[in-house]
Image: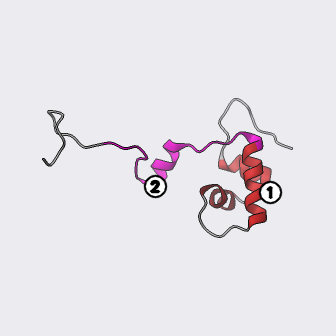
Amino acid sequence: MSRHNPDRSVTVRDVAREAGVSKATAARALGEYGAVSEQVRSRVLAAAEALGWRPNELARSMSSGRPRSSSRRTNWAGRPAGG
């Protein structure tokens, strides 16, 4: 049974607790990387859906060091940089 506080966003840790796996395993299953069995992946995805988990793009871009938006560098006059 979930003990999630509805006043805050659902985290990977919440999903992991609900699915009965480690935070690292939940992150691998949700991020679709690394080795995770189909049985565990199914449990994690079911827990994520039950809790209403959604990826946090800000946290993802901060951890990867790369923004997930399409932006163009411009010079001070608003023209594309380098040209």
**Residue at the top extreme of this rendering:** 7
Please, what secondary structure does the residue beneath circle 2 have?
helix
Q: Residue drawn 74% across and 55% down? A: 44
- Looking at numbered disc 2 in the image, what kind of residue is underneath it? Ser
Q: Where are the magenta residues, as a range?
A: 50-71
The quarter of the displayed image where residue 78 is located:
top left
Counting from the top left corner in percent of width and height, residue 1 is at 87, 44
The kind of residue tagged 1 is: Gly
Label 1 environment density (alpha carbons within 10 Å; few <14, some 14–19, many ≥20): some
- Give the residue drawn at x 73%, y 31%: 6
- CA neighbours of label 2 inside 10 A, class few (<14), some (14 to 19), many (20+): few
Residue 52 higher or lower than 31, as above or below? above
Residue 64 numbered mark, or none: 2
For residue 72, what is the image quadrant?
A: top left
The residue that label 1 is drawn on is 20
Q: Secondary structure at mark 1?
A: loop
Instruction: List x then y, in percent, for residue 37.
Output: 73, 68
For residue 71, side relative to residue 45 (left or right): left
Q: Which circle's residue, 1 or 2, is located before the other in the chain?
A: 1
Residue at 60% over, 56% down:
31
Residue 15 place in picture, x, y as percent: 72, 49
Q: Is residue 4 left or right of residue 59?
A: right
